[in-house]
Image: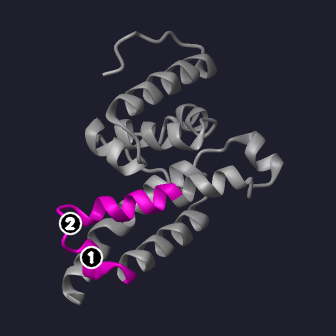
Amino acid sequence: MDDEAFDALFAAHFPTVVRTVTYVVSDRAIAEEITQDAFVKLLRHWSKVSAYERPDLWVRRVALRDAQRERRRGWRRPEIEASAAPPAMVAGPEAGRSDVLAAVSTLAPKQRAIVVLFYFEDRPMDEIAEIVGCSTSTAWSQLHNARKRLALTLAEEVADDVR
């Protein structure tokens, strides 16, 4: 096992995976736990996954899948879910957009993951589809539906062109 390669991958991608998962689950502590579990799974499968062209996408996909599973289980208290508070760790250009983050947190887990990956991480749709485990056309469709729901939530118009 190449410990240095794993350590480098962990150091380079752990913070961004935590950030993405935080947007999906709206709780940094739970996001860190989910991300740690994903990296443990990566370590278990490192001999196979290290040969992949992008092992970082593998761990991100595992983390997002687990985050979506957590959301579906209903692990959050109803009063916290109703408030749809944005993640507290938000910094940078999106920090002043708590209304947008609150609206994003109301989306279904897969739609939320797609929105975060597309708009907050600026990833190409082919890569997003691979991460969330669907076809590219399905990811575009999910993004379009998410944008329509966000527009309703934010009382704004949605253009037909998602890109």
Measured along the vertical axis of the image, is residue 161 above or below residue 143?
above
Give the secondary structure at mark 2.
loop
Q: Quadrant of the C terminus?
A: top left
* Left or right of 87 on screen, residue 81: right
- Please state if 92 lies on the left or on the right of 75 as rendered: left
Horizontal and vertical percent position of residue 157: 50, 9
Magenta region: 44-65
Distance CA(mark 2)–CA(mark 1): 8 Å
Q: Which residue is mark 1?
A: 48
Q: Is residue 56 magenta?
A: yes
Residue shown at the point (27%, 39%) measured from the top left: 126
The reply to whether dot 2 and dot 1 touch (C-beta < 8 Å) is yes
Element class at badge 1: helix
Secondary structure character of the magenta stretch overall: helix
Q: What residue did someone put label 2 on?
A: 52
Q: How many marks?
A: 2
Colour mapping used in the image: one colour
- Left or right, residue 2 beside residue 101: left
User: Of the residues shown, which amino acid type is indicated by label 1?
Assistant: Lys
Residue 140 visible in the current orientation: yes
